[in-house]
Image (spheres, grey):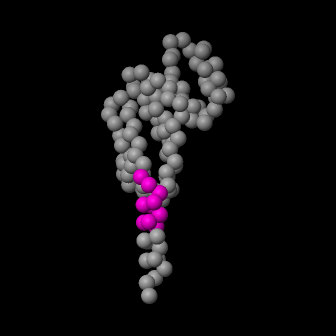
């Protein structure tokens, strides 16, 4: 009689296969990066702000690129073209955006890139 552990492996493989595959391509102006996810994946793409690209990924399964991860993954990635965005400020919500803008208004000649990850 096979052990219970051996019976779980085919069930896990079937569940991962049914869950699907998702690929995300990111570009920061210097080249593209590709990440592939197998399993249960949720990708959140906030509103794009010019050349800024923010991605939040949650994955239960297998993640490939760069490296290999198995299990639970929660990743936030922001890419920006360095020629357009030399100062990047990451905020969480409208109140933080307004606070950051009020501080930056006192600094002349600074044009930051603001990313809201709320």
Relative depth, front residue between 4 and 30 = 4
Provide the residue span drawn in magenta: 12-21
The x, y position of residue 88, in whole percent, is: 49, 27
Q: Looking at the picture, tell me which residue is in the foreground, 22 or 4.
A: 22
* Label total for image: 0
Identity of the residue drawn at 43% across and 84% down: 2
Residue 47, percent across and down? 53, 30
Residue 105 shows in the view = yes
- Residue toward you, 107 or 12: 12
- Tell me residue 111's x, y (percent): 50, 17
Name the quarter where the C terminus is drawn: top right
* Magenta residues, dominant SS class: helix
Left or right side of 114 for 22: left
Q: Quadrant of residue 17?
A: bottom left
**Which residue lies at the image location 32% right of the left edge and 34% below the top edge?**
31
The percent position of residue 10, horizontal first and vertical second, equals 43, 71
Q: Residue at x 42, y 66 (%)?
A: 13
Q: Residue at x 54, y 34 (%)?
A: 46
Q: Quadrant of the N terminus?
A: bottom left
């Amino acid at each position: 009689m096979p052990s219970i552990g051996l019976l779980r492996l085919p069930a896990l493989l079937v569940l991962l296969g049914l869950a699907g595959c998702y690929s995300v391509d990111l570009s920061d102006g210097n080249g593209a990066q590709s990440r592939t996810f197998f399993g249960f994946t949720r990708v959140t793409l906030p509103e794009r702000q010019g050349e800024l690209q923010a991605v939040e990924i949650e994955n239960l399964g297998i993640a490939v690129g760069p490296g290999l991860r198995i299990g639970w993954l929660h990743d936030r990635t922001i890419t920006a073209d360095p020629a357009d965005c030399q100062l990047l400020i990451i905020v969480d919500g409208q109140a933080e955006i307004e606070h950051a803008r009020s501080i930056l208004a006192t600094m002349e000649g600074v044009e930051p890139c603001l990313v809201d990850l709320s």
